[in-house]
Image (spheres, grey):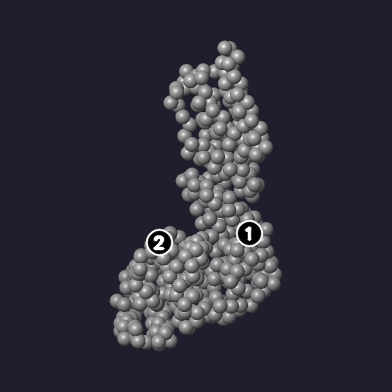
Amino acid sequence: MSQTSTERLRDYLAQLPPQSQALLIREFERALERGEDVTVANFVLGQLRQIVRGTNEEAPPRTDDPARLLFRPLEPFLLEHSGAVRPGQIRRASLLPIWQWLGRDGAPAAAAEFEATLANLRGAGTRSEIAHAVRKLQMAAADAIAEATTASPGTDNQRILARIGSAAVVEDLRGVGAVLKNRDALDALSDKLPGSLGAFGDGQVNSVIGTLNVPSLQTPQVLPFALSLVMQRLSAPWQVIRIAVRIAASDDEVRVAAIPLGVAVTMALHDLAQLAAELRAQIKRGQFDNFAERLKLVHDGMRGVRTELDLRNDSVWGRQMAAIRVDISNSLQSEIESVPGRVRRLLRQRPDKDISATTKIDPDEVDEVLALIAFVAVCRTYASELAINEVTLRTYSDLQQYVEKSTEALVQALRGGDPRVRGFRQMQVKAAIRFCEALFGQDYASLMSRAADNAMVVVERKPNRAG
């Protein structure tokens, strides 16, 4: 592969969501185990691992790590943060204490045997022999986890669980055991699912339902992980609720909640809440890169859930939806209301006595305000669903009126005034014209730019006429 092609591949892989990167890593590692496309798989895996690690430094092959081999089936479901998780997700930070517990108390004999077997096979064993040893340890680990998490007379399960790790680790433990025990069924599901599920219409919904119709995937512990695999293939993950609605044969939330697949709604709402939280953090940091795409995801998700499901205001799901809406509305409203003040600070006409020859306008601040104006315009597009219709329309109208009047006044001010302040006025006019382009379009901005140029020509000719 040429260097250009390699860079193009790295750019594409880097743009993928972390879950998609994890899924690709897992699929290529499985291809290596089967001996398929070894050259391509090794190359793409190397690029993916460099992206995930954030470094180009060589690292030892991760397939030599016993814990990684054991927990490889968990990769599509791992989260890097240690906060709240939904069904079908596991914190990566929980894996180390679980591995340590397995080697210490949970399945010490099986863990020791696996490490010894791996040491003997490394460099000489076949992939099938390693895979067999891995599967044996995974089943032993699943049995140990089931024993630790199942209450039994005469056993102090709470004490056992406390020795494993924190409450978050214990919360993840059952999911780890479920995935390890049902690895084959989840792998088969992953192989059968299409690489991408676009519109997720009736045909695709029915096909996925048929693929999920496997007894081992229908248990309360495993079903969320099966649905997570489906969500990773969906262009709009909230659409997973269509599976539950189809099985319930109703959009009534009571009937949907009564079936096991109702967990799909809980998962979709959790992901929407996470998107809203990420958007709120982005707003607080003043970072508006990809803001429109993220806001559209939240907007489309909320509208989609409300369209697909008949939610009651006083139900658990109804209150969750209301909380998401209030959360995002409050975050957006406070930021929207701050924009006119930022614009006025840059464009207000200061008295000549308050302007010195060194007074400048910070170009970075102009860029920030431009981003905020674009932010308000984006919010206006999605205002109705997000309960910010009134504040957005009012703010956008105020911005248009103020920028239009200020620009005309600033252009007029170029024709007279103290020459000492003219440089600052020109900076204000340039900023105002950029705001005009964002609010009114290129044609109006060009018109005001020509007006500013004409004003400066008049100013430059005045001394000649006087002479």
SS for callout 2? loop
Q: Position of residue 150 (x, y in %)?
A: 42, 76
* Residue 416: quarter of image: top right
Residue shown at 58% from the left, 24% from the top: 456
Q: Left or right: 205 with respect to 347? A: right
Residue shown at 67% from the left, 58% from the top: 307
User: Looking at the image, which is closer to me, 165 or 358?
Assistant: 358
Q: Is residue 269 above or below residue 295?
A: below
Q: Name the amino acid, label 2.
A: Gly
Q: Position of residue 292 (x, y in %)?
A: 58, 50
Residue shown at 59% from the left, 56% from the top: 297
Q: Name the amino acid, label 1.
A: Val
Residue shown at 60% from the left, 53% from the top: 296
* Residue 56: quarter of image: bottom left
Q: Does label 2 or label 1 sit earlier along the sequence?
A: 2
Q: Position of residue 17 (x, y in %)?
A: 51, 62
Q: Farthest top residue?
A: 467
Q: Left or right: 407 with respect to 130? A: right
Q: Which residue is mark 2?
A: 54
